Structure formats: C-alpha cells, structure tokens
Image: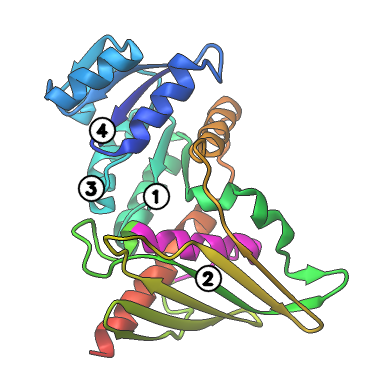
C-alpha cells in the first residue's frame, strides 16, 4: 500500500513516515508522496523518509498512492482534503478531529459510504494503555455514573478553537462510554469560561460527563487525565502519550484498509463532533 500525506505541516506526518519507512512497522506499506508543493519543509520530509513524489494538491496524489493520511492541524480543512480522495475510493485516515462541523463530518461519512472507501479517524488517547482500566460496568466498583476528562485546549486556537486539542477530551469520554451514537439535538450542555479554563457538562445515557479544558502555558500544560466515578468506587488515571503515540492509529488504519471495514461505524465517528459542537454552542450562548 502506497501512502500519501496531506497537511504536512503537522509533526504527525514525520511520525507516520518514521513508522512506515524507517522502522518498517507494516511491511508492504510505504509512505511515497506528499501534497502541499515543494516547500522547504516538504523537501526535508521527503529526504528524511526517502519519498519520491511531491505534488501540489490532494487530488494530485491520485495515481501515485493507494491510501492517504490527512493531517492538517486545522480540522476545518479536512473535508476539502479528504473528500476527493474518498470519492476516488482510497482508504483515508483523517487525523483528529474528523472535522470541525457536523455538516463536514457527515459529508465525509456519506462520501465514504457511497464510494465504498474506508474512513478512519481517532484521537491517540483512545489507544493509551491506561484507557483499558475504564469501563461502564466495573466488577468491583459497580455501574458508571460520572466521567470527568481534563486536558489542554485553547478555545481561541487558530486551528479551529477547542477542536484542535479538545477533541481528545471528547473522544476519551466516548471510548470510556463504549462509543455511544449521538445525534444533533441529543445533548443538553452547560459550559462556561473563566480566563484560561473552560468547563462543560452534559449527560450521555445515565452517565454525567464533564470536561475541563485548560489553555496551554509557555511553561507547560495540564496533563490529560480521566476520572470515572462508579456507584461503589472511583478510578482515576493520567493518560500518557509516549513517543510512539501515533503508532496505534496507524495500526488501526492499516488493519481497516486491509479489511475494507472501519473500526467505528459512521454514527460513532460522527458522535465526538456532535459533542464538541454542542459544547461550543453552549459556550457561545454563555457569553
């Protein structure tokens, strides 16, 4: 499988190239092409990974690659980058977030379904080892009643505000809750902002879900952390991202592309965008 990349300004692209070409984590799969033109950055990336092709536009990848990874830091660009590739039938991994509007996310999912292409998108926090200790029903602690996720995110980020990092919080909660299907209008959200911190709360099923988004500072940032409160106990853990934090997403993509079947359903992929959109709307209404 020949893999091409869009949104090469994202450091994740270099990670994926390392995993594919330098470390050969997936024999028979190779990074071969970059979109975005012959910038100094792209030339260095190509030299780093031994890539042969640099093109201008995402559509120029067609004919050069068998699959694509879209990594734009601004998730608002993901639809325009991924849609023509999906329409052509290519498997596509869209780095978080899938999109920054429900309309764009739904459009990508519709195109993937119509063309029979495989669309994968996931926060790296879905795969961290600590996530496995969280469950909706715990043998010792009982049913889950409250999930709280903390982490860095800036509502004023130039990369679509809370969607840039806040999608990590939301996908973590969705993973803990078993990836429920949520549709526009399903959620009632309360949100507020005080200086560098945003709080949001909602209820998903029978579980209260709260989020704390803290703006990263020059001297550091709050770590990602999750707390699950059950009827008879509490589980809490920092969520650590190691140097290979992009590897599980790549593993999932390769597996899904080979099987022709995404890991999550279209409705499950849309749900985090539904949640974060509702949070943004509540935050806007609170001003």
Q: Residue 12, how many percent across, how many down?
A: 37, 36
Q: CA distance from mark 2 to mark 4?
A: 29 Å
Query: Quick one: label 3, few (<14), some, or many (20+) residues within 10 Å?
Result: some
Apparent side of residue 236 relative to residue 203 in the rendered image (left or right):
right
The circle on residue 8 is 4
Q: CA distance from mark 3 to mark 2?
A: 26 Å
The answer to whether mark 2 and mark 4 are in CB contact below 8 A is no
Residue pointed to by mark 2 = 149
Residue at 66%, 55% in the rendered image: 130
In the image, which is nearer the foreground, mark 1 or mark 3?
A: 1
Residue pointed to by mark 1 = 96
Which of pointers 1 and 3 lies earlier in the amino acid sequence?
A: 3
Residue pointed to by mark 3 = 77
Q: CA distance from mark 1 to mark 3?
A: 12 Å
Q: Main secondary structure of the magenta part?
A: helix
Which of pointers 2 and 4 lies earlier in the amino acid sequence?
A: 4
Residue at 32%, 64% in the rendered image: 216
Which of pointers 1 and 2 lies earlier in the amino acid sequence?
A: 1
Pick the quarter of the image with the C terminus.
bottom left
Q: Which residues are magenta?
A: 165-183
């Amino acid at each position: 499988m020949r893999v091409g990349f869009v949104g090469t300004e994202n450091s994740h692209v270099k990670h994926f190239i390392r995993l594919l070409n330098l470390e050969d984590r997936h024999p028979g799969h190779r990074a071969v092409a970059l979109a975005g033109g012959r910038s100094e950055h792209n030339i260095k990336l190509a030299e780093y990974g031994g890539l042969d092709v640099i093109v201008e536009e995402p559509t120029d990848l067609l004919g050069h690659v068998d699959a694509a990874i879209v990594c734009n830091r601004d998730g608002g660009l993901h639809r325009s980058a991924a849609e023509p590739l999906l329409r052509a039938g290519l498997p596509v991994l869209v780095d978080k977030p899938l999109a920054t509007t429900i309309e764009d996310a739904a459009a990508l999912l519709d195109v993937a379904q119509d063309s029979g292409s495989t669309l994968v998108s996931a926060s790296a926090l879905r795969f961290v080892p600590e996530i496995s200790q969280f469950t909706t029903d715990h043998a010792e602690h009982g049913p889950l009643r409250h999930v709280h996720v903390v982490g860095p995110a800036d509502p004023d980020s130039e990369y679509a505000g809370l969607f840039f990092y806040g999608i990590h919080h939301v996908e973590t909660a969705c993973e803990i809750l078993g990836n429920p299907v949520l549709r526009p209008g399903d959620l009632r959200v309360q949100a507020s902002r005080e200086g560098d911190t945003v709080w949001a709360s909602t209820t998903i099923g029978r579980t209260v879900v709260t989020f704390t988004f803290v703006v990263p500072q020059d001297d550091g940032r709050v770590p990602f952390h999750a707390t699950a409160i059950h009827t008879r106990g509490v589980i809490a853990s920092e969520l650590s991202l190691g140097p290979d934090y992009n590897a599980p997403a790549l593993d999932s993509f390769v597996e899904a592309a080979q099987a022709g079947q995404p890991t999550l359903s279209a409705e499950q992929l849309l749900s985090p965008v539904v949640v974060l959109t509702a949070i943004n709307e509540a935050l806007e209404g609170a001003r």
